[in-house]
Image (tube, coloured by chain):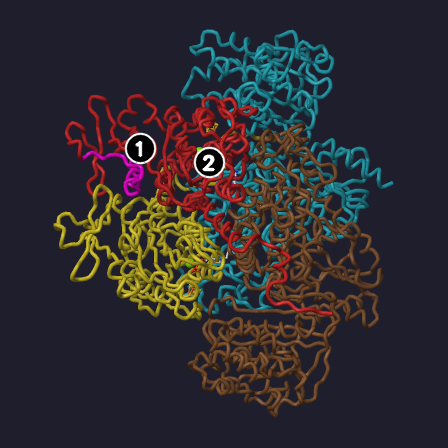
Chain colours: A red, B yellow, C brown, D cyan
Amino acid sequence: MSEITEAPKKYTKKDFESDQDVRWCPGCGDYAILSAIQKMMPDLGIPRENIVFISGIGCSSRFPYYMNTYGFHTIHGRAPAIATGLRLARPDLKVFVVTGDGDGLSIGGNHLLHVLRRNVNVTILLFNNRIYGLTKGQYSPTSELGKVTKSSPAGSADRPVSPCAFALGAGATFVARTVDRNVAYMEETLRRAAQHHGAAFVEILQNCNVYNDLAWNVLYDRESKIMNELRLEHGKPLLFGPVDDRHGLVLEGATPRVVRVKDAPESVLWVHDDGNTWKAHVLSQLWAPDFPIPIGILMQVEAPAYEEVLLEQERAAIAERGPGDVAKLLVSGDTWRIG
Amino acid sequence: MSEITEAPKKYTKKDFESDQDVRWCPGCGDYAILSAIQKMMPDLGIPRENIVFISGIGCSSRFPYYMNTYGFHTIHGRAPAIATGLRLARPDLKVFVVTGDGDGLSIGGNHLLHVLRRNVNVTILLFNNRIYGLTKGQYSPTSELGKVTKSSPAGSADRPVSPCAFALGAGATFVARTVDRNVAYMEETLRRAAQHHGAAFVEILQNCNVYNDLAWNVLYDRESKIMNELRLEHGKPLLFGPVDDRHGLVLEGATPRVVRVKDAPESVLWVHDDGNTWKAHVLSQLWAPDFPIPIGILMQVEAPAYEEVLLEQERAAIAERGPGDVAKLLVSGDTWRIG
Amino acid sequence: MSDAVASPATAAKPRRQLDRAVVRFAGDSGDGMQVTGEQFATEAAWAGADLVTLPNFPAEIRAPAGTLFGVSSYQLQFGSRRVYTPGDRLDCLVAMNPAALKVHQRDLKDGGLLIVNTAAFEKKNLDRAGYTGNPLDDPALEDHYRLHKVDITRLTMDALEGLPLNVKEKERCKNFFSLGLVSWIYTRPIEPTVAWITKRFAKNPAFAEANTRALKAGYHYGETAEIFTECYGIEPAEMPPGLYRSITGNRALAWGILAAAERTKLTVVYGAYPITPASDVLHEISLHKRFGVRAIQAEDEIAAVGAIVGAAFGGAIGVCASSGPGIALKAEGMNLAVMAELPIVIFDVQRAGPSTGLPTKTEQADLLMALYGRNSESPVVVLAPMTPGDCFFVAYEAIRIALKYMVPVIVLSDGYLASGAEPWLIPDPKTLPDIPVSFRTNPEGFAPYVRDEATLARPWVRPGTAGLEHRIGGLEKENITGNVSYDADNHDLMVRLRAEKVRRVAQEIPPTTVNGPAAGDLLVVGWGSTYGTITAAVEEVQQSGKAVASVHLRHLNPLPPDLGQILRQYERILVPEVNSGQLVRILRAEYLVDAVGFNRVRGLPLSTEEVREAIDQLLKDKR
Amino acid sequence: MSDAVASPATAAKPRRQLDRAVVRFAGDSGDGMQVTGEQFATEAAWAGADLVTLPNFPAEIRAPAGTLFGVSSYQLQFGSRRVYTPGDRLDCLVAMNPAALKVHQRDLKDGGLLIVNTAAFEKKNLDRAGYTGNPLDDPALEDHYRLHKVDITRLTMDALEGLPLNVKEKERCKNFFSLGLVSWIYTRPIEPTVAWITKRFAKNPAFAEANTRALKAGYHYGETAEIFTECYGIEPAEMPPGLYRSITGNRALAWGILAAAERTKLTVVYGAYPITPASDVLHEISLHKRFGVRAIQAEDEIAAVGAIVGAAFGGAIGVCASSGPGIALKAEGMNLAVMAELPIVIFDVQRAGPSTGLPTKTEQADLLMALYGRNSESPVVVLAPMTPGDCFFVAYEAIRIALKYMVPVIVLSDGYLASGAEPWLIPDPKTLPDIPVSFRTNPEGFAPYVRDEATLARPWVRPGTAGLEHRIGGLEKENITGNVSYDADNHDLMVRLRAEKVRRVAQEIPPTTVNGPAAGDLLVVGWGSTYGTITAAVEEVQQSGKAVASVHLRHLNPLPPDLGQILRQYERILVPEVNSGQLVRILRAEYLVDAVGFNRVRGLPLSTEEVREAIDQLLKDKR
Ligand SMILES: Cc1ncc(C[n+]2csc(CCOP(=O)(O)OP(=O)(O)O)c2C)c(N)n1
Ligand SMILES: Cc1ncc(C[n+]2csc(CCOP(=O)(O)OP(=O)(O)O)c2C)c(N)n1
Ligand code: SF4
Ligand code: SF4
Ligand SMILES: [Mg+2]
Ligand SMILES: [Mg+2]
């Protein structure tokens, strides 16, 4: 029911680069994400003018300026609401929301909740650098407990929230996680997200080299990555660890356990099924050091999109009784004539 | 580490009834909840003057007026934030938050997220009547899809959020569900919630007989209740259904399945373990008609409470360097003398 | 309906002609006073009277029966001359229970008609109303008023004898008995009510029959019972000829949006979060999906305004309504529209505050917030309707201005206009001013902030237009290019341009109407829902031959260009407002005139009497 | 440090005495200009000069090197007379790269001293700055300024020869070379900088050594290089004797809270959500847990204000700071405190807007929002500090008033005060006015809204007090009992009481200081951070013998009781503001005086020169 039209011509990455100077710090993970998205855009086959990027406020939220599409750099935390209104007005547009861990989960948590539960047809990219970059380095809702920053010199006292667990709790229909330094895999995940029908949520683990350098080092470092990265592939068992000593997961009741593949019969290994919502919740809870960190699509299911239901009601009303007529409306109900 | 003091005297329910006229509609489910809470209060053994009820706005949020304790009927959706500040200022007080499905999950969703993830020591009671009562009957974030109300004459287009699933996604440490018409059981659950260390979240299914009568009828009606109510008891198997044909649940991977007890060996039945966070997520997803609806404590785990960590930092700082001294502070660092 | 409906002509008792009458029906929330009042208004309107209504209901959803805070009432003034207000003091009060008597008695004129339902004056109800004895036994009551003790309940039950309804159901018809009785007293035709009942209870003929019988029983009771010695006639008012309907302010706001949607052929996104007394705009809009007005019930007011800013960016019209704290929450979103220069319209259905305040009561105290309630210099256009029906035109005008100038517009309605009703001469939508919309499509010379010479508006571009891809946002923009700019002089320029754009809206304002002499001793200046009260008070004073005039502002920002000139023609200026003095501050600052406020902040409209007294006082002080 | 540090006495070249000098260091964000400027300010202060500083840094976190938007600068004016502003035009500009020259050159006086680091003027940097050729080759530059081309980079490298640092590390010391050079030029003592370096790099002696060497190399370069023919002396200013320190406005706000916490022995809950330029208050507070000030970094500004309202209900002091859109978001929470009559304090560190605006730039445009930016009648007290150091006293005073009157107080600081610094005569905390706090504990005659006769404050009750259990909220309250009340007259009364409570704060305001003749041709009225500029401009005009005076308001609501009287002593009134005219509207409305605004909204402080010109102009118009 999506009304998005097909692109008439073949684009290249260059077509999606705007004329603005990119103003992130040299070395910022945002560059890699920008590049991956620009690269992925031509695959969507959507005319450039039908694409809109909506963002909030933060380093990450500068994103729309750098895309040669329509863009709106709005206010802190409200991008999901603004995107919802836009989709309702213009269901023919492909709408992306770019947000950060502060923008999306601190001030903007409520709008994120509601855009996800409503399943509005938008692709949401949350750049998670576990810090407030733009305001120069305070801890964020995803910062680890005890994080020392300018605003928490004795260590933060807030337990972090997991963006993917939050999204699932909110009732999201597409939940994925990617890493900025894993460009090819990120591109693939972003493409799948952009093609999802309904609200797609992608947590992008991103490096802020100025205020929180190497926050995701377990997934960057060649060594530690081996035991900490869990690539999700639909239909394949969940495997990680060194080539010569692969590890897998088994589920006992709903409780996951790490096993050595060589010790376990293949039949007991947890095979990824991205349509299984029950398992998705378990996946969203997996985290280092006890478990590897799932990267890829945790879940994708189909559900009606909010604005499409509303538009269907509009169409049905018009089909049934014809388009509105103000002159008729004004004289409907009780009237009386004078003179 | 809680600094709440013990009550010196034995209270009765009457001691917790304020002198205000109760202004809910006759027949409203809120009366039963009020009564259950007033009844349960003496068991907490806390001096009345050390108890504070904080609420937002809604029929449910009128609650504090009727409790003969300290109370603050604040603004729409912000009670968790106000309670957090109160606890930080006054860790010696026992703080309750009363909210509704609109107050807590529509406008106040973000504050609910953050009070839960921070694990602030407050007991949160969310009266879920699946409607906006006070504003005279619009659908709420927990209303079922297609709900016909004043603001959705053609049926609502919003997929509902599950309060318990949301709370778990937010990282809550205590999550429970009760029903207004099940007074004794409700009392017991509320008591356990009030005794939890950290943020306790209780969803109370409540009847709004004026705007959404019998929304929870599957759990009220003697007949349908049998197959739809799943009482959670720690250490006991999850059983429901008629006495002569009990049903239970089994977990296959993380996927639950309903079985007849007589067909299943006892060993495979899902036994409730309220300390198991993995299973709690599965529980929070169970809903009629495919599954029975869990009532009771879905999960309770221990974690440091936000304000206690902060206060510990304060104590440590004072222990290390003594209490602050402004005169000394003012002359610290670079100074110079003139004249 | 050829059934022998009592009609005014059959009334046998002496009839006295009146100019106007003020009637209030009061009873328990469960007594159906709102329906009764509305039907009486309909009858009065059918008979050609001009009228203004004032519904008043408790904040509680269902207050316990018989309590003081559970009293619900409906007042109206109708007359053969122009009626501007629902009236100050009552000519007739119907009190269906002791609580209603207690709450409303003091508003009844000395010698006024007091009709009570004696059946309700029993122990339980008297206790609940806080009476120690039965007030009906107090002879003082009969000294002050023309008291009629009627056992409405029993008379209704008697009339319904034999109908297949239970006692409770029958009892519930008693409001129609009182309506019938009052209809007879004021010789109003009950035909429209009979028709209404028939339609309303089409699916339940027993109820239709019962209510109709109760109505007629009341009517006949007036005619035949010995206790009523006269009835009153009110001639049809001289009103402009045409087709009329009754309309409330909230419905008129909603219909104004529909009219603009139809005219512009644009999609409207209506963003709402329920709040009293603005919710009914959402309810009304939601009924009319066929007009392409898309309502979103957002998670809060911030999201609601966000959604309409998003919609405006998408080339749709964005409108939202709210009240009190809900408007305060929209400041940041509105400011984004100010910076992005996008057309949105906000209806502020003002309620009594501050904070949660008195949600069901009216007030005019958001004017300064509308003007200044956003960080930094954030000029927006502010309009205010004067009557319920005017809400239609102002809503339409707000959209027209927003689109023409690419600027946010705030409309200040209030709780009184929202639920108040008036007979409304139905306009022909074709006669509404045009709203030209032209989206920019030409890439040549395009930049997001190039400006129209006359309006200073920047171009509106629909995403989807190839070659015009661009990016805007809440950071300061370089004029013309729209690029992010931290340049000092550009910021100063943009601050001035945003202000000038709003200032230019003055060219849309017609010459100000002065009600009264073009110069004189005193000018009364008002805005918004005080229109009726001020006009009535000024006309009264004028009748006593004084050189007093009034002007009523629909445009609060910018102000009418001719206003300063007008103000200087009068010696004194009085500004009555239902706030602590807001417009008066603006007039003093703007024109340096010694305007004086008359301010009562009681959650109620001002009374004509007190405004008249304030005028008299100021005229006296002058000497 | 007995090492032969060059000291002013050893300077052999001719020294010219100056009154004042304005110096700006400008370079790339990575060039350490903020440290350089701060150290130069310290040196100037040590030598007894009065001074005012103006840091200026890009909005980007790390802008790419060499770009125009990546330029960072630090300006200060220091002198032997009172210095009120950082100065309009520069006597000396140090440009560390082409972008810095391009951005700042126009601010240098004709004939001013221009020092450039020639090493940075190479192709890549020139391109990035948008130069087509090398501006240093343009003879016009030497015509206009006293240009000194110094290869600062090479000279630094040479000086660090042999130190165990790599090239990059050495190069990074070049800012201290320029500091040394400018210190020599203005005969400032480099001892404090040497001490600072030693402390700062205590853990890294090689860096300490390198920076110290660079500093001294610069100093000696000035002395020995042939190109500098003279240096300048500035006598110590006549400042009140005592112990001084440098303080920024944000730090002073934070310390003001600590002082109030210490004095009252109450807990303070500080609610914050990071936002430029207010975040540093949070950072500073967070360092001082020993003072019992508990900071919460909330999820947003709404939660931050909510938390402090909750804390105030709990008997603690609630304070929060924010800016721009963050303040707009606090409206609803503040209004709850207005209704609940709870003491909270909000610091609004104003930034340039509207919307996200220019987050790192200063402005004074939130005054009307502070007064009116909440639904309905919502009076609060509004104060504004005049200088960075004054922020300390105003923060303390705000808390004192909030507690005494049980009322919210807004403090209007701004971006300029926030990061600007001045030499500050350290007060003795014992001399601060007392803040008596008495929580109600006596149940006898207690009701939540009984009022103190003098202040109209309601009692403050700490939950935990037996026998005083009570419930309050955002619905309108009955006076005295605090019960929910929908009564019309009670609402009117409460609206008046809330206003009167704020009005009574006028009794706290000392007589207004008039700077200049007590009557005359023109009075300049200002508020907030324009204090220095206005005072400097007025003093200049006064020196030319004109009857001009100024008053500077710290109390914006209520206004000083003697203000009306003062205003009427002057023929004309000029109100310079960094907004479009806000205080001027208030004065006109309040006192009906024809006050005229001078308004520039450039994200920068006003310049002394333009204010002086505006004064001259108005004096001329008068005739
Ligand atoms: C209403 C409001 N409050 C606060 C701010 C200040 N602010 C700007 S960005 C930001 C946090 C950004 O963090 P995040 O979303 O993680 O983005 P990042 O910079 O890390 O990419 C804050 C607090 C603002 N612009 N608006
Ligand atoms: C800022 C703000 N927006 C809107 C409202 C209007 N309002 C009051 S209660 C309510 C919804 C209450 O729903 P819920 O929390 O489910 O409570 P219930 O009445 O159903 O118990 C709304 C929208 C308000 N008071 N304040
Ligand atoms: S501060 Fe961090 S997140 Fe922001 S641009 Fe710099 S490196 Fe990137
Ligand atoms: S409206 Fe519903 S929730 Fe509110 S008091 Fe009435 S029955 Fe209860
Ligand atoms: Mg971040
Ligand atoms: Mg509800």
Residue C463's x, y, as percent? Answer: 57, 36
- Judged from the image, the secondary structure of the residue bearing numbered disc 1 is strand
Q: Which residues are magenta?
A: A268-286
Q: How many marks?
A: 2
Dot 1 corresponds to which residue? A294
Q: Is residue D16 visible?
A: yes
Q: Kindly identify which chain the residue marked by label 1 belongs to.
A: A
Rendered image quadrant of residue B178: bottom left
Dot 2 corresponds to which residue? A99
Residue B79 counted in the magenta span: no
Upstream in sequence: badge 2 or badge 1: 2
Q: Is residue D426 left or right of residue B309?
A: right
Q: Amino acid at mark 2?
A: Thr
Q: Depth check: D255 or B152 in front?
A: B152
Q: Amino acid at mark 1?
A: Pro
Rendered image quadrant of residue D110: top right
Q: Which residue corresponds to the image point at 47% horizontal and 81% vertical from the top-left? A: C171
> Whole-Å distance between the Cαs marked 2 and 1?
21 Å
Q: Is residue C482 left or right of residue D473?
A: right
Q: Is residue C336 visible?
A: no
Rendered-image quadrant of the C terminus of chain D: top right
Q: Which residue corresponds to the image point at 64% horizontal and 13% vertical from the top-left? A: D132
Q: Depth check: C447 or C351 in front?
A: C447
Rendered image quadrant of residue D98: top right
Which disc number belongs to residue C305? none
Residue A272 counted in the magenta span: yes
Q: Is residue D156 above or below residue C232?
A: above
Q: Which residue corresponds to the image point at 81% horizontal and 37% vertical from the top-left? A: D546
* Few, some or many residues within 10 Å of mark 2 (<14, 14–19, 20+): many
Find ligand 4 in the image and state its quadrant. bottom left
